[in-house]
Amino acid sequence: MRVAVIADVHGNFEALRAVLAHIEQGGVDEIVVAGDTVNISPHSKACWDLTQALGCPVLRGNHELYIYTYDTPEADPTWAEERFKGLAWVRGQFSADDLKAMRRLPLTYALPDLLVTHASARSVFDSVDEGTPAQTLRELFAGTSAAFIVRGHNHGWLERAWDGRTLLTVASCGLPLRGRLEAQYALLTREGSAEKGRWHYEKQFVPYDRDAALTAMDAHYMEMMGPLGQVFKRELATGKNHTLPFLRQYLPAINRGEVTLRAAVERFLARSGSSD
């Protein structure tokens, strides 16, 4: 059995189309979309519609949750801050039925001895890295006996072995942040019998029209997304994480009123540009 796992499209329609064409050429038995189909790049609605049309399992990520809870009593109060300005624009692309469908998206999807999720079996927000303790992993995936667990969320490849299991983090389709610029996904293969077979994976790197994706981040996009749109564009252009370093460096000063978000973004991009 061959399964393609796509994670973290983030509204990058060019990347998604290229990955789906690559999958079609290679042939798979099933596609699983592991959350965060929407937000960041401009074409969230197109990516949502395309993944829904596939008729495959589509899982909930934290960015789907941001969109369907935005401007509701469930929303985080910080989402009213300027740095989250783009959420209103992205949410406005979706119908009431779309938002209901997002809310119904499952957290996990299971096949024999395989579990796929966005972040963990517990939450759409949990991160995993090389140093995550084994006890924490047991808590994140309590209730599943699958020997092979596949997740996204962290935008870079990572394989962890723990308690005789394999935990694979899949790099991002639409916003890779570990230096590679191609759209990425995982191709899983189950070899052997249904009773004794084991899952294996191959990293897939797919060139796509990144220039078109960057061009779509035009003046209208920047107006709608606010100052952080410039940081997102830098991430797409470089394949490196800029949002988290920016927030760690400047958010405390922004919250204290010592610098505006726009001025902080300008400073950050000017200082980080030489190291890209």
Image (spheres, rainbow, N blue to C red):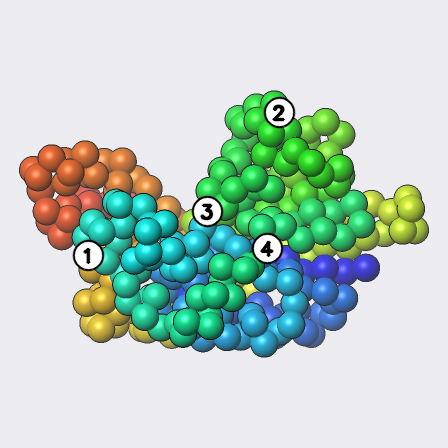
- Say whether disc 4 or disc 1 marks the residue closer to the N-terminus: 4
Q: Which residue is mark 1?
A: 227
Assess disc 4: are there few (<14), some (14-19) or many (≥20) residues with their C-alpha within 10 Å of its C-alpha.
some
**For the point 58% across and 50% down, which residue is it?**
107
Mark 2 or 3: the one toward you: 2
Q: Which one is in front, 192 or 97?
A: 97
Q: Which residue is mark 2?
A: 134
Look at label 2 and name its amino acid. Ala
Nearer to us of marks 4 and 3 is 4
The residue that appears at 48% across and 65% down in the rendered structure is 100
Q: Is residue 175 visible?
A: no
- Return the residue at label 3: 178
Q: Earlier in the sequence, mark 4 or mark 3?
A: 4
Residue 125: x and y in percent read 46, 42
Secondary structure beneath disc 1? loop
Q: Which residue reaches farthest front?
A: 73
Crowd class of label 2 (few under 14; some 14 to 19; many from 20; radius 10 Å) = few
> Contact (CB < 8 A) between labels 2 and 4?
no
Residue 68: image location, x then y, percent = 40, 60
Q: Position of residue 123 (x, y in %)?
A: 52, 42
Amino acid type, callout 3: Arg
Q: Earlier in the sequence, mark 1 or mark 2?
A: 2
CA gap, disc 2 and disc 4: 25 Å
Between the C-alphas of marks 2 and 3, the distance is 24 Å
